[in-house]
């Protein structure tokens, strides 16, 4: 985990340097460099996960499977409802395939937004679902739905399977994320 944290801090510093430089010089340079850094961060994260299995052994919790809704697998976002955005508006991403979640059998989750990759843990108990602290790459992307998406994801407390879709929601706010299986 220390190596992953170091990589994220390094990428943050590089992102700020390139952003500052881009403000002075050339915006297209910033966009191209940000994309390169994001790709590097994704590759580095997966490399660390593959070549440092001892870190995987330290991760908890174990997932319970006492609910017929099996979240394990790959999911693509179809829409989300956010009470903090435009008075409870329903959003559909321009390209739904860029918002994804992958749940594994060991309580780990990873995914992508329209800007960054993220990873962390989850606990599933019946129809309750909670995410642990989620780490993320930190690229700047104007006009991204990422902030609204993460606000909902961070407060998910319930899951359901409705009309062939996995629906993650917050039962208090009504915010929800609807996914289809990949």
Image: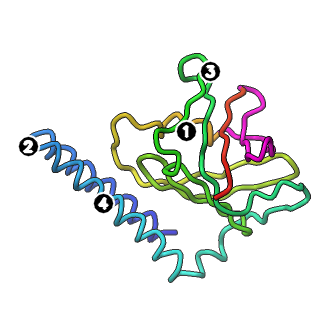
Residue 172 placed where, x, y %? Answer: 76, 27
Instruction: Check residue 8 for magenta coloring.
Output: no
Residue drawn at (62%, 60%) of the image: 102
Kindly report the distance in space between the C-alpha atoms of the residues bearing marks 1 and 2: 31 Å
Start-end of magenta stretch: 155-173
- Count of picture labels: 4
Dot 1 and dot 2 residues touching (CB under 8 Å) = no
Dot 3 and dot 4 residues touching (CB under 8 Å) = no
Look at the numbered disc 3 and give the secondary structure of its residue: loop
Residue 71 placed where, x, y %? Answer: 75, 57
- Location of mark 4 (residue): 37
In front: label 3 or label 4: 3
Kindly report the distance in space between the C-alpha atoms of the residues bearing marks 3 and 4: 34 Å
Kindly report the distance in space between the C-alpha atoms of the residues bearing marks 3 and 2: 39 Å
Q: Left or right of 138: which side holds 159?
A: right
Seen in the picture, residue 54 relative to 24 is either above or below; the reply is below
Q: Could you tell which of marks 3 and 4 lies nearer the N-terminus? A: 4
Residue 82 placed where, x, y %? Answer: 61, 28
Residue lying at the far front of the rendered structure: 163
Q: Could you tell which of marks 2 and 4 lies nearer the N-terminus? A: 2
Residue 48 placed where, x, y %? Answer: 48, 75
Look at the numbered disc 4 and give the secondary structure of its residue: helix
Q: Could you tell which of marks 4 and 1 lies nearer the N-terminus? A: 4
Q: Could you tell which of marks 1 and 3 lies nearer the N-terminus? A: 3
Seen in the picture, residue 128 relative to 39 is either above or below; the reply is above
- Location of mark 2 (residue): 25
Kindly report the distance in space between the C-alpha atoms of the residues bearing marks 2 and 4: 19 Å
- Location of mark 1 (residue): 149
Q: Could you tell which of marks 1 and 2 lies nearer the N-terminus? A: 2
- Location of mark 3 (residue): 88
Q: Quadrant of residue 35?
A: bottom left
């Amino acid at each position: 985990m220390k190596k992953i944290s170091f990589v994220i801090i390094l990428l943050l510093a590089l992102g700020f340097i390139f952003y500052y430089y881009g403000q002075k010089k050339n915006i297209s340079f910033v966009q191209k460099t940000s994309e390169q850094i994001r790709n590097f961060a994704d590759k580095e994260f997966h490399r660390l996960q593959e070549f440092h299995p001892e870190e995987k052994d330290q991760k908890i919790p174990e997932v319970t499977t006492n609910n017929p809704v099996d979240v394990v697998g790959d999911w693509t976002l179809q829409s989300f409802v956010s009470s903090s955005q435009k008075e409870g508006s329903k959003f559909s991403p321009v390209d739904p395939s860029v918002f994804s979640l992958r749940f594994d059998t060991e309580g780990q989750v990873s995914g992508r937004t329209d800007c960054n990759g993220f990873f962390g843990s989850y606990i599933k108990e019946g129809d309750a679902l909670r995410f642990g602290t989620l780490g993320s790459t930190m690229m700047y992307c104007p006009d991204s739905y990422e902030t609204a998406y993460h606000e909902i994801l961070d407060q998910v407390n319930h899951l359901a399977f409705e009309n062939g879709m996995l629906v993650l929601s917050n039962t208090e706010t009504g915010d929800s994320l609807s996914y289809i299986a990949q």
